Amino acid sequence: MKQAYQFLKEEAGGGVLLMIAAALAMLIANLPGIDHVYHDVLHRPLGPALSPSIGPMTPHLWINDGLMAIFFLTVGLEIKREFLKGGLSTWDQRRLPVLAAIAGMAAPALVYLAVAGGQSGLANGWAIPAATDIAFAIGVLALLGSRAPASLKLFLTAVAIVDDMGAVAIIALAYSQGIDLYALAGAAVVLALLYGCNRAGVRALAPYLLGFAVLWYFMLLSGIHATVAGVLAAMTIPIKGNPGREDSPLHRLEHGLHPWTAYAIVPLFGFANAGLTLNGQALSALFAPLSLGIALGLFLGKQLGVFGAIWFSVRLGIARRPHGASWGQVYGMAMLCGIGFTMSLFIGGLAFPGQPLLVDQAKGGILLGSLASALAGFALLRWIVPLSRRVA
């Protein structure tokens, strides 16, 4: 439990820093005279062409394909820990978060397809509104203090972790192209060696980190997005430690990486990807089918999917409502699940490669839907729910 609260504290701090980084990116991208510097610096060649399919490395690619692989390694460690030793280690604990996460991914995708799916070339963006940004959402909950019960924060974390699993699967299956079988075979060999280290009882982190780096390179060459290497490598890192102690290789690595991902990598990713020039063309594009589909998917689809799954599960006796949380608070939490910032921006870049106009439209929809979800969820939990209790 102590580790869970430390996790929430770091996510909350990282979420606030992410908000600042995104706002700073928007500011710089719209300041006359220096707006072009933001885009020029991010897309300037900085390194060799590690993969023929993506060309020379740029700061933007190093962040999105390199540093985000470390973020996904941390995500994989969290997933493994929660499913084996944490709050998702039993079926009773998993049932409600899994159902809420599945419905919370399906409903936004359906809303998006209903709005934008009929437009030529836009159906590929169906997964953009399906993900929840755990750092941003926990950051908003942190601003509420004691008005949001701890059980709600832990439940939101569990939903977001299952959501992350779905997002990784989507990235690997739906947004991979031009598969290089030789590189994929090399990745399989590295993964087998890492698994062998686990089975042999290797507890030093160096072999796993070296293997992760090699696995990342093979995945970069394979056509499957390189960040998936982070989750795959995480699955091989041992979690067994001394009874009652959190000293396994997985715990050590997670404790070491989490502050870096929460306070540096994710905010840097937000800064590198949130810069949207708000000229007349961009503002009118917010009403384009792509932007509207994403915004409505995040704002309406997420809250309806997550809250609907929880409500039906409780009514049917499948699971119990989070302890100490009212239905109003659960609905506010479901609204916050519509904050799809980091993962949505990431998937948006994969859905429309080489189409900067569509990527910008996707950014606009993500920012609009995430902002609406954050403000509505915060308002409901901060003012409306407490007011309804006083009136009652």
Image (cartoon, rainbow, N blue to C red):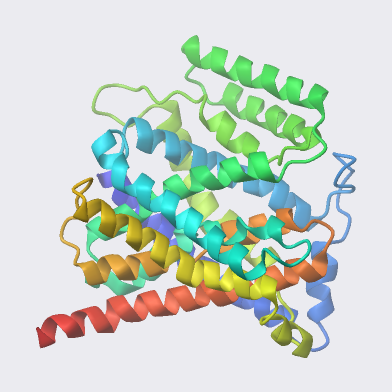
Residue at (52, 24) in percent of width and height:
236
In the rendering, at what x and y percent does residue 215 appear?
69, 28
Residue at (43, 45) in percent of width and height:
162
The image shows residue 67, relative to residue 296, as above or below, that is: above
Place residue 120 in its image quadrant: bottom right
Residue at (61, 62) in percent of width and height:
113
Residue 278 in view in this figure: no
In the rendering, at what x and y percent does residue 216 appear?
70, 34
Front in this rendered view, residue 288 or 171: 288
Front in this rendered view, residue 283 or 46: 283
Q: On the picture, is 79 further left or further right than 63? A: left
Place residue 26 in its image quadrant: bottom right
Q: Residue furthest left?
A: 392
Residue 89 in view in this figure: yes
- Location of the N terminus by quadrant is top left
- Location of the C terminus by quadrant is bottom left
Residue at (43, 41) in percent of width and height:
255
Q: On the picture, is 121 further left or further right than 115? A: right
Q: How many marks?
A: 0
Q: On the picture, is 223 further left or further right than 68? A: right
In the rendering, at what x and y percent does residue 150 appear?
24, 59
